[in-house]
Image (tube, grey):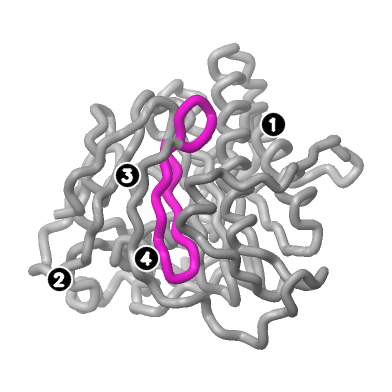
Amino acid sequence: MAPMGIRLSPLGMAVFCLLGLGVLYHLYSGFLAGRFAFFMLSEPAAGGPEGPRGSAAAVDLRELLAVSVLAAVRGGEEVRRVREGNVLNEKAKGKTREGAEEKLTSGDLLSNRRMYHLLRAAFPTVQINSEERVDTADQEPVSWDRSIPEEIKEKIQPKEVPAESVTVWIDPLDATQEYTEDLRQYVTTMVCVAVNGKPVIGVIHKPFSILMATVPMYQARLSKVALLSIRHALLRHIPGYKVLALLDVAEKNQEQADVYIHVTYIKKWDICAGNAVLRALGGHMTTLMGEEISYTGSDGNEGGLIASINMDHKALIEKLPDLEKTSHK
């Protein structure tokens, strides 16, 4: 079973981890509520000396955490506004490797515009990868006043890392197909920050949620391998929702599962934030062969994935020896 005691808040959910702390803050009225919990993790991956404090080549992860939450919320505002206005301007974007049609809406594009330009204005020197293309001629005037919510300042100390070690992954609207079908419970906006390829900040925001999550202190415990929970919703390509399905989220429309398995190619912006969340809670997300996924370089993960929490992850992998072959198709 997943960690207990999760309750949900008035506008959405942000889940993220930072440095040696995994922190869960709660969004309401477009910002942060004051309740939190934190989880011990390892430091971001070593990959070179830190830049000198205050240098142009350094990035403060506490500031990046604050702006990532804000970006997910602002993107969610666009997603909600377009859906409620019922002017989606839906069109085909292309097809996946498996031949499924991918859709694109105004919600995707406007959310991406808000999220990308906010992050780019705040941190012009970091690598930002987004699911949607950004029109370089579109210079939306946006700025961030560099203010950090008190909830973050009270618990997180500044931590600078070299800008070149940072990669930001944006998914401005996860579950576009479901969005066009008005299945709002599956929709999320996500931001993830990786340092030297390891996810250290993850934000998963549910724009249409009327509840907010609070998670108590939790320490992962290994348990016997459980049967996979396969439900109709989990057959959809909705990675953000599927990670939340591994948690004991007490929301009416949130389904639950014991394990999340994806056996084909998948984009890193789909899974990076969820990986960070699971790491914060003591869970795991790896390839089907048990390898850690690196969030740098190419935008795709060829090795499939298996995600779990409160389970013996290695034992799960040993029970699924043949799935890795499918992941490269």
The residue that mark 2 highlights is 222
| Furthest residue toward bottom | 48
Considering only order in the chain, which callout, 4 or 3, is on the residue closer to the N terminus?
Answer: 3
- Can see residue 178? no
- Please state the extent of the stretch shown in magenta in the rendering: 13-32
Q: Which residue is mark 4?
A: 279
Quadrant that contains the N terminus: bottom left
Disc nearest the viewer among 1 and 3: 1
Q: Is residue 284 above or below residue 95?
A: below
Q: Main secondary structure of the magenta part?
A: strand
Q: Amino acid at mark 2?
A: Leu
Horizontal side of residue 320 vs 205, given as left or right: left
Closer to the chain start, of discs 1 and 3, is 1
Question: Residue drawn at (72%, 63%), measured in percent from left and top?
Answer: 127
- Left of 223 or right of it: where is 295? right
Which of labels 3 and 4 is toward the front? 4
Above or below: residue 14 compared with residue 284? above
Q: Could you tell me residue 99's position as x and y percent? A: 52, 48
Q: Which mark is residue 110?
A: 1
Looking at the rendered structure, the secondary structure element under dot 2 is loop
Q: Is residue 273 magenta?
A: no
How far separated are the C-alphas under marks 4 and 2? Answer: 14 Å
Of mark 2 and mark 1, the one earlier in the sequence is 1
Dot 3 amino acid type: Leu
Q: CA distance from mark 3 to mark 4?
A: 24 Å
Q: Are marks 3 and 2 in contact (CB under 8 Å)?
A: no
Chain-order first, disc 4 or disc 1: 1
Residue 25 part of the magenta-drawn span: yes
Mark 2: few/some/many CA within 10 Å (<14, 14-19, 20+) = few
Residue annotated with mark 3: 235
Circle nearer the N terminus (3, 2): 2
Q: Which residue is painted at 73% across and 37% down in the image?
A: 113
